Structures are given as structure tokens and as C-alpha cells.
Image (cartoon, rainbow, N blue to C red):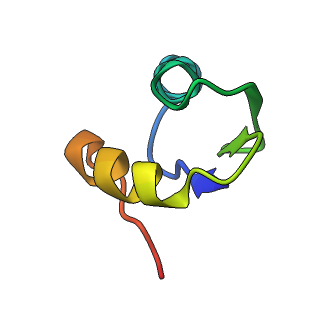
């Protein structure tokens, strides 16, 4: 799950759609977070900082 604090709802939806496509996975955007099906942590650690989203851990 990636927290999307600071992004408006439309930007969250667009980012969620892009992440699902890049990971080849299903998922949802809800409550300010993107939830993807499967284990895509390494992929997200590479993609999210490019989009200005801070990754913890």
C-alpha cells in the first residue's frame, strides 16, 4: 500500500491507474492509498520517488 498524502483525488486516481498498469496488477485507490494485488514492493520503491511520493521502509 502506498500513501498518497498531498495528492488531490484525481491525481491519486491517475497514479493508481499508472501503477496498476506498470505492475500488471489489479488494485484500488481508496482512503488516500493505492492498494495493489500481489507483492510489488521493489517495483514501487523504484517508481514512486520518480513521481514525488516518499517511500518509507
Instruction: Find residue 24 and report its horizontal and vertical position in percent.
Output: 58, 24
Instruction: Find residue 23 and report its horizontal and vertical position in percent.
Output: 53, 32
**Which residue is at a point 58% across and 55% down the rendered structure image?**
3
**Which residue is at a point 76% across and 29% down the rendered structure image?**
28
Q: Quadrant of the N terminus?
A: bottom right
Q: How many marks?
A: 0
Closer to the camera, 54 or 27?
Answer: 27
15 left or right, relative to 28: left
25 left or right, relative to 57: right
Instruction: Find residue 46 and report its horizontal and vertical position in percent.
Output: 30, 53
**Which residue is at a point 75% across and 30% down the rendered structure image?**
27
Above-or-below relation of 20 to 34: above
Above-or-below relation of 24 to 46: above
Above-or-below relation of 55 to 18: below
Closer to the camera, 21 or 32?
Answer: 21
Image quadrant in which you'd find residue 16: top right
Furthest toward the left, the residue is 50
Instruction: Find residue 15 and report its horizontal and vertical position in percent.
Output: 47, 27
Above-or-below relation of 7 to 42: above
43 left or right, relative to 46: right
Amino acid at each position: 500500500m502506498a500513501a498518497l498524502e498531498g495528492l488531490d483525488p484525481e491525481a491519486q486516481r491517475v497514479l493508481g491507474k499508472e501503477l496498476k498498469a506498470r505492475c500488471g496488477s489489479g488494485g484500488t485507490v481508496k482512503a488516500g492509498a493505492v492498494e495493489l494485488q500481489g507483492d510489488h514492493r521493489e517495483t514501487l520503491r523504484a517508481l514512486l520517488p520518480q513521481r514525488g511520493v516518499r517511500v518509507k521502509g
